[in-house]
Amino acid sequence: MIHVFVEHTLNPEGKAYFADWVQEIHSWASPFEGFVDVKVIKDLQESNTVLLLEFEKYEHLQIWRTSNEHHSILSKIHPYHTGASKMRTYEW
């Protein structure tokens, strides 16, 4: 199983939109082979917003990451960014 933690640094409007945006990711990613889930992760030590994206295999994640759907959903959160996103990918 592949687990991707993505940390977004967002302005207040982006933070308010984040949970809805993650639900949109779920709708757009769920038809993709190997998609398992996407969740909002609350960071108790930082004010940044974090999501957890899960796919069955790394290859499935790569197909999602190179898709038009992925690029479209990212464009919806981009205007709210106040800093760079950080992504960490794990397998367990």
Image: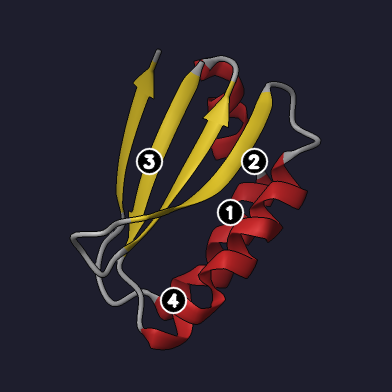
Judged from the image, the secondary structure of the residue bearing numbered disc 4 is helix
Where, quadrant-wise, is the C terminus in this rendering?
top left
Determine contact: label 3, label 4, CB under 8 Å: no
Residue sitting nearer the eye, 27 or 78: 27
Q: Nearer the viewer, residue 86 or 36?
A: 36
Question: Which residue was labeled with disc 3?
Answer: 5
Circle 2: residue type: Ser
Q: Is residue 14 left or right of residue 69?
A: left
* Contact check, label 2 and label 1, Cβ < 8 Å: yes
- Residue 7 occupies quadrant: bottom left
Name the N-terminal-most of marks 1 and 4.
4
| Residue in view at x 54 percent, y 60 percent | 74
Disc with the residue nearer the chain's start (2 vs 4): 4
Direction from residue 31 to residue 57 in the image, left or right? left
Label drawn at residue 71:
1
Q: Which residue is label 2 attached to?
A: 67
Report if the CB atoms under discs 2 and 4 are less than 8 Å apart. no
Q: How far is disc 3 from disc 4 in space, using C-alphas?
A: 17 Å
Q: Position of residue 5 (x, y in %)?
A: 38, 41
Which label sits in the foreground, 3 or 2?
Answer: 3
Going 35% across and 83% down the picture, which residue do you hit?
11
* Spot occupied by residue 79 in the image (x, y as percentages of width and height): 46, 79
C-alpha span from label 2 to label 1: 7 Å
